[in-house]
Amino acid sequence: MENNGFTHHRDVIPPPINQGVIGSCSAVATGQCLSATVQMKFGGPHDPARRPSVQELIDKTQEALPNDCYRAVPGEGGFRGFPSETAFKYIKQYGVAVEANHPYCGQRTLTPTPPDSPRIRILDYTVISPDFNIKLIICKQPIVGVLTACESLGPHREGVYQGAKDDDDAKTAGGHAVVIFGYGTENGQDYYWIQNTWRPEWGDNGIAKNLERGAHEENCKMKSSNRSSFPFLWLKDLFW
């Protein structure tokens, strides 16, 4: 929490995970969001034994919930991406192993989860409608959101990311899932704190400020046409 009118939960955000070449941004963002929410409940240093396995979400979700996933993309080993609400649905129904027992490798595998691995479960999850003021949720816990990512987002390092630099850059936009864990105002510009699903060298160790609204129609802003989501946790018996 910061003292000049805006809030963030950076102290509970886990170290960044680089999704690599596979289109797993929703799986990574969902895992990171849940990890941060668990961290808010337990406190203390980040522990891989309390972090959800993003790899299991990639390996198992499309088999368990095929009707809730996208079509396979050529070159991604048959991986079918999915929105964050599908990942939360999987965790609600089946639980998810901890990262320490099923670590991320950046591609879909057939590696089974150790049967004796502790599993994290959630009571439920909520999908937020586009017209809802997500700041009412963010001040309580991180959420998964979708922004329109332009090519100019790739080299961003510091300051508030302003979005597409011109109309040509805006045409490169595509949906990209991130963790939203705060918001604020800098030099009169409203922004969200986000954790990306890219390499730690992006932004400030994978974290940046993203402008709420940009000058171009598809300007790397938070997409109003997309829904955000977040989990509810059991206050006890979180693991089994």
Image: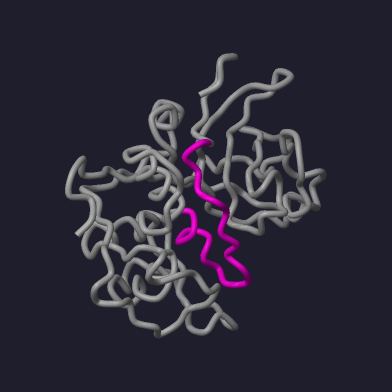
Residue extending furthest toward the top = 4
Is 21 contained in the magenta span?
yes
Image vertical order of residue 69 relative to residue 195, above or below:
below
**From the image, which quarter does the C terminus lie in?**
bottom left
Count up the numbered dots.
Answer: 0
Q: How is the image coloured?
A: one colour
- Residue at (61, 32) in percent of width and height: 212
Left or right for 65, reference 152:
left
Left or right for 28, reference 234:
right
Is 189 contained in the magenta span?
no
Give residue 134's quadrant in the image.
top left
Q: Nearer the viewer, residue 229 or 120?
A: 120
Left or right for 24, reference 54:
right
Estimate the x, y position of residue 78 in percent, counting from the top left: 48, 83
Image vertical order of residue 9 relative to residue 80, above or below:
above
Estimate the x, y position of residue 54 in percent, counting from the top left: 43, 64
Left or right for 164, reference 209:
right
- Residue at (38, 49) in percent of width and height: 34
- Residue at (23, 55) in percent of width and height: 239
Q: Which residues are magenta?
A: 11-29
Estimate the x, y position of residue 119 in percent, counting from the top left: 26, 62
Q: Main secondary structure of the magenta part?
A: loop
Q: Nearer the viewer, residue 171 or 198?
A: 198
Estimate the x, y position of residue 61 in percent, counting from the top left: 34, 70
